Image: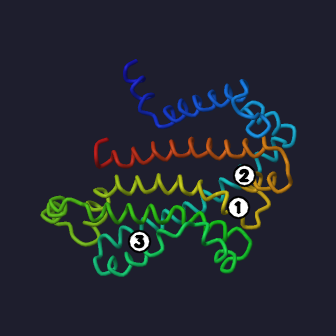
Amino acid sequence: MNALARRLRDSDLAVGAVGAFGLVAIWEIAARTGLVDPQLFPSPLLAIEMAAARLTAETVGENLAWSLFRVFSGFGLGASAGAVIGIAAGWYRTFGMIARPLIELLRPIPPLAWIPLAIIWFGLGEPSKFFIIFLGAFFPVVTSAYHGMRSIDPMLLRAGQTMGLGGVPLLFRVAVPAAAPDLATGVRIGWGLSFGVLVAAELVAADRGLGYMIINERNTGGSVGVIIVGILLIGLLNLVTDAAIGAATKRWIGRWHGT
């Protein structure tokens, strides 16, 4: 029983769910008691009722599926590229000296600033949306991967060399596992930022997706309840998927670090 309680206490999903439930409960009470204007900021239950009057379950499901598809696609590309480049820049000094200044030059630029170029380069289709989400994932992952590689204890590398490892085998059997905690942190940050730029990505001539659903309601003067439900769905999706990624990365790191 104690083990189960400890697992629940340490679960990212459980902690996040408790916090989210508490905030929603406070929000509901504030709206019901008149502390906030229910017309401008309706309670969660009222927002769901308002959204249900305008949207079908099929419409919500389709928008949700398209948003998930875009996030997974953009994040997958961005995190993969970030991990490869960050590991290579941290391992190969010459490549790092070339790549790091360029990365540091581009890293502070917010993904929203890239929207005009994304349209010029990729048009109004899905690639431009993938590119914006790609940027949200790429920079946290590449920075964390590089930091992890540069922070490896030299004793670990020397121990691997004394066992006959060198070059690529030393990289993948010693260096990458040693940098895994930093890489995992970057992956989770990149995943959260991918959701953060989702609405911006779906500004690019989208006709489906949660971001489109939110923006369309605003542009057409529709129900504020639909906007709130869309925002809550994005937050809920991020909460659940981030917990799943956290559990997966903990198992991955545990293979080498015993966590």
Tell me where residue 95 sits by quadrant: bottom left
Number of marks in picture: 3
Q: Nearer the viewer, residue 69 or 43?
A: 43
Residue type, numbered disc 3: Ile
Q: Quadrant of the C terminus?
A: top left
Residue type, numbered disc 2: Leu
Q: Earlier in the sequence, mark 2 or mark 3?
A: 3
What residue lies at 41% left-to-right and 73% top-to-bottom? Answer: 104
Q: Are the residues tagged 1 and 3 within 8 Å (C-beta)?
A: no
Query: Considering the numbered disc 2 on the image, is that residue within a helix, a strand or a loop?
Result: helix
Query: Considering the numbered disc 3 on the image, is that residue within a helix, a strand or a loop?
Result: helix
Q: Nearer the viewer, residue 38 or 18?
A: 38
Circle 2 is placed at which residue position? 210
What residue lies at 87% left-to-right and 42% top-to-bottom? Answer: 54
Q: Earlier in the sequence, mark 1 or mark 2?
A: 1
Question: Residue 85, which numbered label?
Answer: 3
Q: In the rendered view, tell whether residue 122 sits above or below residue 140.
A: below
Nearer to us: label 2 or label 3: 2
Residue 210 placed where, x, y %? 72, 52
* Label 1, label 3: how far apart the Cα atoms are: 27 Å
Disc 2 residue crowd, few under 14, some 14–19, many 20+, Cα 10 Å: many
Residue 45 placed where, x, y %? 74, 30
Residue type, numbered disc 1: Glu
Residue 109 placed where, x, y %? 52, 70
Q: Are the residues tagged 2 and 3 within 8 Å (C-beta)?
A: no
Q: In the rendered view, tell whether residue 215 sits above or below residue 7.
A: below
Disc 3 residue crowd, few under 14, some 14–19, many 20+, Cα 10 Å: many
Nearer to us: label 1 or label 3: 1
Q: Are the residues tagged 1 and 2 within 8 Å (C-beta)?
A: yes
Q: In the rendered view, tell whether residue 124 sits above or below residue 192.
A: below
Circle 1 is placed at which residue position? 202
